Image (cartoon, rainbow, N blue to C red):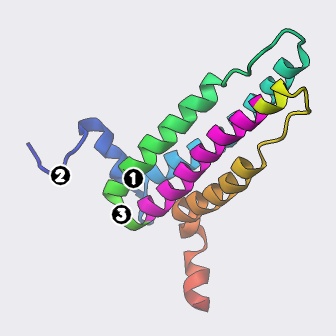
Amino acid sequence: MDPNVMLGPLDQLGREVVAGVLVIEFVLLGLVVVNMLTRFLAYRRNVTEAEQEDVESLSRHPLHEATNVLLLAGTFYYTTFAPHGGIVLSLFVVGMVIADVFEHEVRSVDLRKDEKLRAPKGALGISVFTLAYAGFQSLFFLVSDYWGAII
């Protein structure tokens, strides 16, 4: 058995696709975009739940929680291929997940106090940074020639 193979078929994600870009980088970029969309769906669902009179607590959106888990696992796995980029991206993702947890609790407190639910501003802010870095990691080959000419 090859000692460089960690997870068998999943290690194909570490193969180069275009100009030094790994498959996992495109997968992570897609997961970040899906996570941003599911965050919007989760917030919209919480607002709908809050409008109902008999709701005592807000539920978590299962698809959003699944994308959080997949992003965490994916960025930690990406760290095995690209240590620097993986650590930076995993810090963004961990911050995003922590912001999600605390903002969900804030919305639960708003519900108990019969106040208007607050939007997930912190998680949206850090998800924009996460999207920017994941985009940089996966799409830099598009501008690398121009970047090299300038720098």
The image quarter in which residue 41 lies: top right
Secondary structure at badge 1 equals helix
Residue nearer the viewer, 123 or 113: 113
Q: Looking at the picture, which amino acid does disc 2 mark? A: Asn
Mark 2 packing: few (<14 Cα in 10 Å), some, or many (20+)? few
Image quadrant in which the C terminus is located = bottom right
Alpha carbon separation for disc pair 3 and 1: 8 Å
Disc 3 or disc 2, which is closer to the eye?
Answer: 3
Residues in magenta?
Answer: 85-108
Q: Is residue 48 above or below residue 104?
A: above
Q: Position of residue 39 (x, y in %)?
A: 71, 37
Residue at mark 2: 4
Q: Is residue 121 above or below residue 114?
A: below
Looking at the image, residue 55 sits to the left or right of residue 145; the answer is right
Q: Looking at the picture, which amino acid does disc 1 mark? A: Tyr
Q: Looking at the picture, which amino acid does disc 3 mark? A: Pro
- Dominant SS in magenta: helix
The image quarter in which residue 110 lies: top right
Q: Which mark is residue 78?
A: 1
Of labels 2 and 1, earlier in sequence is 2
Secondary structure at badge 2 equals loop
Q: Position of residue 43 (x, y in %)?
A: 78, 32
* 87 in the magenta segment: yes
Image quadrant in which the N terminus is located = top left
The image quarter in which residue 150 lies: bottom right
> Residue at left 66%, top 41%?
102
* 101 in the magenta segment: yes
Residue at mark 3: 83
